[in-house]
Structures are given as structure tokens and as C-alpha cells.
Image (cartoon, rainbow, N blue to C red):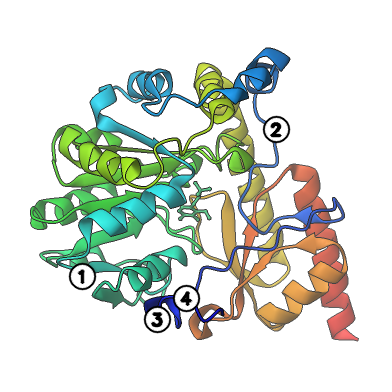
Amino acid sequence: MSRFLSGQYASLKEYVPGEQPQDKKYVKLNTNESPFPPSPGVIAAVTDEEVEKLCLYSDPESKILKGMLAESYSLKSENVFVANGSDDILNFAFMAFSRENGAAFPDISYGFYPVFAELYNIDAKIIPLEDDFSIDTKKYLNIGKMVVIANPNAPTGKAIQKSEIEEIIKSNPDNVVLIDEAYVDFGAESVVDLVKKYDNLLVVQTFSKSRSMAGARLGFAFASAEIIKDLEKIKYSTNPYNLNRLTQLMGVKALEEQEYYDNNCKKIEENREFTVSELEKLGFSVIPSKANFIFAKHEKISGEKIYLKLKDKGVLIRHFTAERIKDHNRITIGTKEQMQILIEKLVEIIKEEEK
Ligand code: PMP
């Protein structure tokens, strides 16, 4: 730390991203990326001509991209916000909507929520998940704070019902209810259509998972025109050009090829079912997941040992050290071949442990 850092940040515990090894050595199942490349139109969009245009600023209003998103999700452009990954949107939302009343979110969820809460010195009500890692949505009724829930939740993969979310929205009319749908395309139910009905709902999604563009950094959100205007105000007060030209262009192309991504989601869901049944045969218990990852615990071997031994054998998964979840590991669902390698390596590890 330099002697120049503002005192308020001295004790801030920053978010720690999953490992991003820069060689291709690993079967990489640790940060919930798609194993599939972006669709052909996205790849073809990056022409020399488009790269040459990088000497010009991007459209700060992202008009074309917002128009396409509005059309794809049956809303209006005024209900759409886009930013540099959904992390950017979560940051803006904590900054804009939680400083007066505070924020409520589960103890086991996306690790960035408590970081934003600390960053902005927000009164955070952290609500423990139930023993089976489910969210008891009744605990968020009439809470009087911004509510932040990932659906499906991370790292558990558990989803909640749209009707339960609607109850939370209805019972907190004076606060924003932020539903983080980063993983919704793998089998959970979206609440995007409720944006037309409630002016306090903010739904956040991303191109990083189902649309294979984690490295391009493109997040989007839907809400009432008023909430979107507030987010725009924060964006224009920090970084108006937060979305580069190529990412905006690739986002539009991806939306034109939705069928490709729908097919990929289907494959991921099939590979998820395959992986769960293989893991159960090997003595793992797996939480039912609606995401592109699963959260699994072995009956005998510790979570840390499995993580380290798999890493040694060239397979990266995500291990967390928090007490409640240290015996679980989060495993991203990749291609069938990748999942077969994972299973083979786990069979080896279990044999080694039995010796
Ligand atoms: N929300 C959740 C629940 C996540 O797991 C992630 C990915 N780490 C994000 C948001 C952020 O994703 P991105 O910034 O790539 O859109």
C-alpha cells in the first residue's frame, strides 16, 4: 500500500477472481466460461476495417446494441443498459441504489456483493442460506433495503421461482430488487418480463456465460426507464465510453445468431446431467443446478485435496475457503470431452486415496 491511498480503502478486501492461467495447459473448469467459441458472425465481425475504426471513440449511447437487446427481449431501448461486463453494472447499482437504505444479500453468493458493500460503506444485511443451501425468499420480504439475489445462485447453482421473486419485488416497493441472472440461460426462469410491471426491478445479465464472450466484457440490464436513467447518470459520471467499439459490434452479431447459443446451452445442460450422474457414482453429492456449473462434495475426500490433486493432473476447478463451503468445489460444465477427462482424473484420485 502506498502512503497516498485514501484511508477508507486501507482495509478493503478486494474481490479475488478465479485463476486465469495464460498457457493452455489446463482443462479449465474454474470460472464458468463457455467452452464454445463465439458464433461465426461474431468472429467474422472483427474485420481490418473495424479494427482501423478503433481510432474513433465508440458510441457512448450504444444505440444499435441497445435496440437489438430491446427487440430480443421484447422491451424498449429506454429499458436497456449496457456496460463493461455485468460486474460494471453491479458496481453502478450498489453505488446508485443502496447507500441510503443498505443492501441485503445471501451469505453464500457471488463474492463481489460484499466487496461493493464494503467499497461504498453500505449497511449490509447478510442473510444465511438454509442448511440445504437454498434461499428462503420469505427472509427478503419487507426488508427495506436494496435486495441482491443471483438466480440461479452462485456458487450453488440453485434456482428460485419467479413467483417467489415477484413477492420480494412487491413487498419492497421503495427499494430496488436486483436479480443477477448471469446464469439464467441454462435452465432457470427469467424475470425480465416483470420489468414492464414493476418500477423497482433491475435484472442484470451478461454475454460472458451463455454467449461465449467473457473476454469481450459485455453486460446488460433491464429495468424501468427511470432506473436506467440513474445508471446512465453514474456511467456518464465515471466512464462514458465504457464499451469499446468491437464489443458493441460483436454483441449485435451474437444476438443475430441466438440459435447457435441456444444449442450450446442445451449441450451444457446435457453435459451437466451426465457429469452429475457420473459424480454421484463416485461418491459425490451434488446440489441440483440450473447453471453452467455444479457444486459438489465428496463423501470422504476434502474439497481442498480434490482441488489440488485435480490441478496437479491438469484440471482446474474452483475451491472456496469459507467455512460453510470449504468441502464443496464448484465445477464449470464444459464439453463432453472435458467432463470425461474430469471424471477419469477423479477416478484416479479416489483410487490413490484408497491405497
Ligand atoms: N454475477 C455472477 C453471479 C457471476 O458469477 C459473475 C461472474 N463472475 C458475474 C455476475 C460477472 O460476470 P461478468 O462481469 O463477466 O459479466
Q: CA distance from mark 4 to mark 2?
A: 40 Å
Q: Disc 2 on helix, strand or loop? A: loop
Mark 1 neighbour class, 10 Å CA radius: few under 14, some 14 to 19, many 20 or more: few
Q: Is residue 294 left or right of residue 223?
A: right
The amino acid at mark 1 is Lys
Q: Earlier in the sequence, mark 4 or mark 2?
A: 4
Residue linked to disc 3: 7
Contact (Cβ within 8 Å) of mark 4 with mark 2: no
Residue 198 x, y percent position in the rendering = 13, 40
Mark 4 neighbour class, 10 Å CA radius: few under 14, some 14 to 19, many 20 or more: few
Q: Earlier in the sequence, mark 1 or mark 3?
A: 3
Q: Nearer the viewer, residue 128 or 245?
A: 245
Taking the image as drawn, is residue 75 in sight? no
The amino acid at mark 4 is Leu
Q: CA distance from mark 2 to mark 1?
A: 40 Å
Residue linked to disc 4: 5
Q: Is residue 146 above or below residue 256?
A: below
Q: Nearer the viewer, residue 278 or 306?
A: 306
Q: How many marks?
A: 4
Q: Nearer the viewer, residue 306 or 202?
A: 202
**Mark 3 or mark 2, which is nearer to you?**
3
Mark 2 neighbour class, 10 Å CA radius: few under 14, some 14 to 19, many 20 or more: few
Going 57% across and 49% down the picture, which residue do you hit?
292
Question: On residue 139, which mark appears?
Answer: 1
The amino acid at mark 3 is Gly
Q: CA distance from mark 3 to mark 2?
A: 43 Å
The amino acid at mark 2 is Pro
Residue 176 x, y percent position in the rendering = 19, 53
